[in-house]
Amino acid sequence: MLRKISWLIRAGAYVLVGTGIFGWSSFGPVALPVTVTAFALTGLLMCAWAVLDLRGREDAGWRPSPALPYVLGAIAVLAGGASGVPDATSLVALAALAVLDAGSEASLLAGWAVAGAGALAIEIGALIAGAGTGVVLGSPLILLVALLSGRNRRAYRVQAEQAAELLAQVEQLRAEQRQVAVLDERTRIAREIHDVLAHSLGALGIQIQAARALLTDHGDIERAAGLLGVAQRIASDGLTETRRAVHALRADTAPLDEELARMAAEHRQRHSTDVQFTVEGDPVPLPPEQTLALVRTAQESLTNTAKHAPHQPVTLLLRYQDDDVTLTIGNPLTDSPAGPAFHTVDGGYGLTGMRERLLLLGGALAAGAESGRWAVTARVPR
């Protein structure tokens, strides 16, 4: 659109200059053919200017044609030289249009070359035609102003292009950040669903295994039915927690000490074992992610305890310190094979998942045998 407006301005200027020169001026026998020839050739060159401008922007990705400075220089020379003829001074306006575009579209050297060639042609034409001081001094000054205006327009355009490019880069960076955030959210959701299912299905398997043992070994239908009822409740709770897992990181969570106390009571009731929960220090609110990480660690550890050390007493120690919060879940060792060595938690996918979760939060996880007990210790910063 702006390009079409520029073409209309050039065409209008050409018509106005021609009307002013040939409509109200009287030329001598030598000046008339010189003026007509210069005006006609300038018109042809302006047509070539429009064609090169259009082709250069179509073929070179909206860049000026390399031949454009030469055409602009020819216009400046022809129109500028003929402007020294009496009553044809207004031709300098066409030369100024060419210099303006050269300053805007061409390089700095090419712009100065076009302006310099036009100014030299003005001086030569004025000398030959015997023009006055106004033409000799004023017309080159007009070309200088046109050149500086063109350079200023070029600087503004370059600044606008750089701003647009920077904006595009910012938008691309934002899109990449959104994609990374989506992938990170998917990873957290997958980890959350795994922890929920691992806890629920692990506890469910223990109840079903115990019910099967009661039926096959003792024929105790009543107790087996009770265990199956517990298993049904565990499955229902697992489905509910799975549905909430997607929104767990956004939803408000209960205080950590209250959530762990509830889990200890549920474990005590489901597995008929002694569970002691102790809090040291003054409880402080933690971010939802830290709270959720410690809750999932406790769930995984309690499930593993019920699986590998059934009916053994369990202790949960929640310690609030100045810089971090530590949760330790422990139980006496049994005759079953020991778990992974202390400070190495690669023995199972659940432990690995807990460790990854805590590392992302700047915490740590250690698990292993110590002083005749199996202990899992999780730490998160406050």
Image (spheres, grey):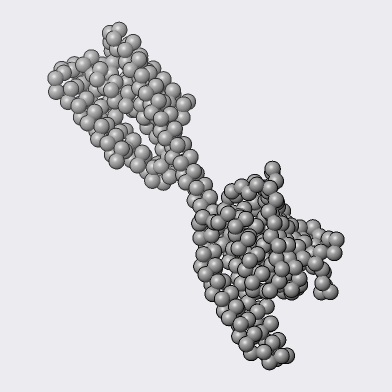
Q: 196 or 13, which is in the foreground?
A: 196
Tell me which residue sits at (42%, 35%) in the image: 160
Q: Residue at x 21, y 16 (%)?
A: 87
Q: Is residue 104 left or right of residue 338?
A: left
Give the quarter of the figure containing the N terminus: top left
Residue 61 in percent (x, y) is at 43, 45
The quarter of the displayed image where residue 114 is located:
top left
Q: In this view, which residue lies farthest toward the left? A: 24
- Which residue sits furthest right? 371
Q: Nearer the viewer, residue 343 or 236?
A: 236
- Using the image, determine if residue 349 lies above or below residue 149: below
- Image vertical order of residue 1 relative to residue 314, above or below: above
Rendered residue at 14%/23% (across/down)? 23
Of 207 and 311, the residue lying toward us: 311
Task: Tell me residue 153's x, y (percent).
Answer: 38, 28
Residue 128: image location, x then y, percent = 31, 13
Residue 195 against residue 38 in the figure, above or below: below
Would you say residue 199 is visible in this rendering? no
Q: How many marks?
A: 0
Most foreground residue, 11 or 130: 11
